[in-house]
Amino acid sequence: MTAVAGVILAAGEGQRLRPLTELLPKALCPVGNVALLDRALTRLAGLGLTGPGEVAVNAAYLADQVVRHVGDRGHLSVEPDGPVGTSGGVGRLKSWIDGRGALVGNADAYLADPAREPGKDIAALLDGWDGETVRMLTKPTLPGTTGGFSGRRFTGFSLLPWRYIRDLPTEQSDLVRTCWRPAEAEGSLELVNYDGVYIDTGTPADYLLANLQATQGGSLIDPTATVTGTVTNSVIGAGAEVAGHLHRCVIWPGARVAATESLTSTVRAPGDLTVHI
């Protein structure tokens, strides 16, 4: 089998998710009390890809936070002058990838594995791969939307052969133009179906939706949180204090909700940063 490295793209600024991403890079925003980046790393670990020899993470916006969070769990590629796009990020890892294929995932993609076995869903990208084609995890395009690939949309992970990676630029560029469309044009793009729930967490509304999906209709409350109010269908992070009333909310670690507050469809971060959706 062709050797494969794992790459998680975590350099983006998350501009659409502001003001939440003024505190945390998008990759570290928690969904179901687990950082999006950790969800991606766990998925790769389920395939046996772990450690700095097999997994790389890139960082740019609030890079110091990403670097600290990853620690020795992966090889770190810091883009000091700002994000250089999905293709530029992979291109800057060419010497580390070094002839292997790359299983590339977007840190901000929320995937709910229908099998509840981390990595089993994206394992389909590797099954029977000859090391020459570009593979993409996909779902059918949504009604009323355009673009995509043969009626399907990208769902967070793609598999790139070395023959494409070795020629990637290291400046600003995206994989759509440098890999996916060229592979489509030459007939070497393979679309792999994903049966689970996929949510691009790029906006506050979709970020909330991903968290609510993670609750499976209930609530997720960290054991270290203090809850004296009422909570329904919400996520409450470590060390949070909730004295008020919550419905369909996300309360970040260390945030507080006063007894006088009644919040619905809201994200609350430390410092009383509040996003109503």
Image: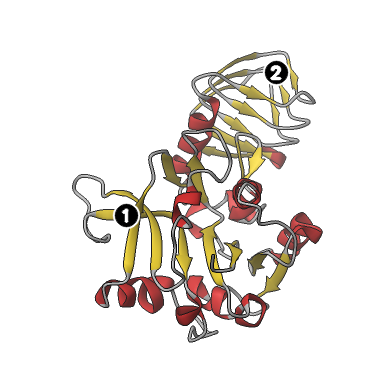
Residue 277 in view here: no
Label 1, secondary structure: give it. strand
Left or right? Give the position of 12 relative to 156.
right
Type of residue at label 1? Answer: Arg
Q: What secondary structure is marked by label 2?
A: loop
Precedes in sequence: disc 1 or disc 2 = 1
Q: Nearer the viewer, residue 220 or 150?
A: 150
Q: Residue at x 53, y 53 (%)?
A: 108
In the rendered image, the vertical position of residue 266 relative to residue 147, given as above or below: above
Q: CA distance from mark 1 to mark 2?
A: 42 Å
Position of residue 61 measured from the top left corner of the image (x, y, whole percent): 63, 66
Residue designated by label 1: 153
Left or right position of 196 against 74:
left
150 or 129: nearer the viewer = 129
The image's colour scheme reads: secondary structure
Q: Nearer the viewer, mark 1 or mark 2?
A: 1
Tally of numbered discs = 2
Q: Residue 243 got which mark?
A: 2
Percent across and percent down for residue 115 are 50, 33
Q: Position of residue 32 (x, y in %)?
A: 60, 34
Q: Quadrant of the C terminus?
A: top left
Q: Which residue appears at 69% of the width and 23% of the height?
A: 258
Residue 110 visible to the viewer: yes
The crowding category of the residue bearing disc 2, from other C-alpha atoms within 10 Å (few below 14, some 14 to 19, many at least 20), is some
Indicate the quadrant containing the N terminus: top left, top right, bottom left or bottom right: bottom right
Identify residue type, mark 2: Ala
Residue 178 falls in image quadrant? bottom left
Give the camera-side residue of 80 and 163.
163
